Amino acid sequence: MSDAVYQAIAIVLYMIAMLAIGYYSFRRTANLNDYMLGGRSLGPAVTALSAGASDMSGWLLMGLPGAIYASGLVEAWIAIGLTVGAYLNWLLVAPRLRAYSQVSNDSITIPSFLENRLKDNSRLLRIVSGIIILLFFTFYVSSGMVAGGVFFQESFGFDYTTGLLVVAAVVIAYTLFGGFLAVSYTDFVQGLIMFLALILVPAVGIFVVGGIDGATESIRAVDPQQLNLVEGATFLGIISAVAWGLGYFGQPHIIVRFMAIKTVKETKQARRIGIGWMIISLLGALATALIGLAYFQQNPNETLTDPEAIFIAMGQVLFHPFIAGIMLAAILAAIMSTISSQLIVTSSALIEDLYKAVIKTNATDKQMVLLGRLAVLVVSIVAMALAWEQNKTILDLVAYAWAGFGAAFGPIILLSLFWRKLTSMGALAGMVVGAVVVVIWGNSEKLSGMLYEIIPGFILCLLVAWVVSLMTYKPKPELEKEFDEAVALVHSKE
């Protein structure tokens, strides 16, 4: 059999496994709570790896290695910022959000949590939150579909559009039917595949390029500054890269996992698993790029046309075609895990936070689950339309959406969990300002080239929410009681 056939078999087996998990989850989904939040039944390992897999996306195996390959270790500042941000997110947000979302009317989405936490009877906060989720997640899902198209183009020589359609079809199928459980279980499996692949590629590759000394010598032959963390970087450039870590506090597809874990106590174990997985995976991605750089310097007859395909290329060079196919499945896992997570959160925003808020319906749970599935389909079609022409890099699309969520939701989530005086008006004003600043700043080449848009967006959202809350705050016994209950629940389970 040819190499392509071996690789295709591995990919097909992987896709069948994902669809099987989707079917299993479909059998366990009885109502809207199951479909949107899995009935708060996730264990720490599934929570940790599903959060990590849904977070990292194709960026971990394509975007980051591509950036390191092209520009050197100066691009690693993003990974450093993300690691710190993820740790703080698990430490500060996870236990409190799990407790508070339960205490505050058993909220199952981020917009419904904010509405219930701040007792916003106008429903405006929930509606605006849902719209922001729809806006930025459409771009985020689109970035995943672009990655899927590039994946099949680079791996099998498919037309970009064909690859996009194949990835979209499988992800839509298991997300549509299995809901949150399917997304979480597939993310867990995908996280394991990504983890193993990012250990194997650099571990085997280091021997092929002559060990650490051989790799270092070859990298320096390409450019001595490739191994320099600060060469070519500006102060604002490093700040912008590290500021990616701020985004974690406001990513709905990540923090919704905190709401779904079984107990508050299990967030500590999940944090250890999640951060361990993340550090090793990021180091593997960095090592893959650098070893790939050394390999192509030592083998000038072989060329790499797209830096973002370095992981794909090294998998094909180092392993038997079937194992290389499993490596390819790791990339597909990274891409699909994020798309599916974002689709389910976007579906919940459309149905739970917009449809139910605007149209007061007496629909049954069965009907609401059906509407949730239709929402997944609609968002997928719009995202596919945006991704149809590949005109931006994966990292550019992810950066824009990441900043949007981080600036609009991050400060509001932190304030809602740690500050009693946050008001619905303060949250709404801050959220709108954060989102608008990101849109304006991110679409200005001059401004975005100077400083990553999440920084001004996050700061202004925080300031506006704080000032407006102080101006509109009135003591509410019910709010005080819930705040105390949530804090007590966190400390009682430590």
Image: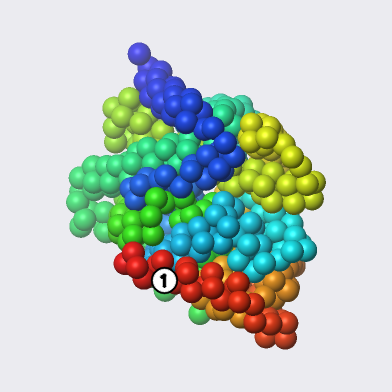
- Amino acid at the residue labelled 1: Ala
User: In the displayed image of the protein, which residue is found farthest to the top?
Assistant: 1
| Residue 40 relative to residue 130: left or right | left
Say if 290 sits above or below 330 in the image: below
- Residue at disc 1, secondary structure: helix
User: In the displayed image of the protein, which residue is found farthest to the right?
Assistant: 359
Residue 147 visible in the displayed image: no
| Residue 199 relative to residue 381: left or right | left
| Residue 393 relative to residue 1: left or right | right
Front one among 69 and 28: 28
Say if 372 sits above or below 325 in the image: below
Which quarter of the image is occupied by the C terminus?
bottom left
Q: Residue 252, percent across and down?
A: 56, 55
Which quarter of the image is occupied by the N terminus?
top left
Instruction: Choose top left, top right, bottom left or bottom right for residue 459.
Output: bottom right
Instruction: Choose top left, top right, bottom left or bottom right for residue 452.
Output: bottom right
Q: Residue 96, percent across and down?
A: 46, 66
Front one among 384 and 233: 384
Give the residue pinned by disc 1.
Answer: 488
Front one among 334 and 96: 96
The colour scheme of the drawn protein is rainbow
- Residue at 67% across, 85% down: 470
| Residue 282 relative to residue 480: left or right | left
- Residue at 46% across, 62% down: 99
Q: Residue 442, percent across and down?
A: 69, 65
- Residue at 28% across, 46% down: 199
Q: Residue 239, percent across and down?
A: 51, 75
Give the total number of marks visible in the rendering: 1
User: What crowding class fits label 1: few (fewer than 14 Cα within 10 Å), some (14-19), or many (20 or more)?
Assistant: few
